[in-house]
Amino acid sequence: MNERREFVRIIRPLEVDVRSDGDNEFRGVTHDLSMNGLLLSAGATRENGTVVRCTVYVDGRDGTARIVATGIVVRQTPEGMAIAFRGIEGLDSLEHLRQLLRLNAGTELEQVEREIAAHLGLIPR
C-alpha cells in the first residue's frame, strides 16, 4: 500500500445495493472495502452526509453471504462514492466482513487481524 491509511482496504468487486430514506435503491460494485467502509462505483450518487443502508453480496446476488450496514456518504472520487460504515447489522454481517478481509488481505493480514481485534468503528446493530 502506497498511502498511509487507518484501515486496510481490499480491492474486490462485489455487487452492492444502496438505499437512503425516501430514495429509490440503486446498484453498484465495490472498488474497495475495509472495516470502516467502501468505495462504490455506481451510476448514481448521493450527497455527502446522506445516511444510507448498504447490502454487499459477498457470494453474488443468489448467494447467502451478505454484509448489511448503515453508513454515511463521506466523499465523491473519480472512482466513485465513499461510504463510511456507522454500524453493521447483525453478527452474520460482521463475520462475513471479517472473513472477507482476512481472505483478501494478503501481506496485510496482521494489520487486518489487529483491526478486527480492536473492533475499530464497528458496532453490530
Image: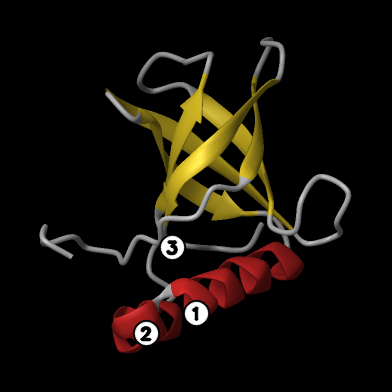
Mark pair 2, 3: CA separation: 13 Å
Q: Earlier in the sequence, mark 1 or mark 2?
A: 1
- Front tag of 1 and 3: 1
The amino acid on which the numbered mark 2 sits, given as a three-letter code, is Leu
Residue at figure coordinates x 22%, y 63% from the top left: 6
- Front tag of 2 and 3: 2
The N terminus - image quarter: bottom left
Q: Is residue 40 above or below residue 45?
A: below
Residue at figure coordinates x 31%, y 66% from the top left: 8
**Contact check, label 1 and label 2, Cβ < 8 Å:** yes
Nearer to me, 119 or 8: 8
The C terminus - image quarter: bottom right
x%, y% of residue 112? Answer: 37, 79
Q: Few, some or many C-alpha atoms within 10 Å of disc 2 (few <14, some 14-19, many ≥20)?
A: some
Is residue 106 found left or right of 43 in the rendered image? left
The amino acid on which the numbered mark 3 sits, given as a three-letter code, is Met
Which residue corresponds to mark 2? 109
The amino acid on which the numbered mark 1 sits, given as a three-letter code, is Arg
**Contact check, label 1 and label 3, Cβ < 8 Å:** no
x%, y% of residue 59? Answer: 75, 58
Which residue corresponds to mark 3? 35
Which residue corresponds to mark 1? 102
Q: Is residue 68 above or below residue 42?
A: below
Q: Earlier in the sequence, mark 2 or mark 3?
A: 3
Q: Few, some or many C-alpha atoms within 10 Å of disc 1 (few <14, some 14-19, many ≥20)?
A: some
Mark pair 1, 2: CA separation: 6 Å
Splitting the image into 4 quarters, where does residue 114 fall? bottom left
| Residue 115, label in figure | none
Q: Is residue 92 above or below residue 86?
A: below
Residue at figure coordinates x 86%, y 59% from the top left: 64
Q: How many marks?
A: 3
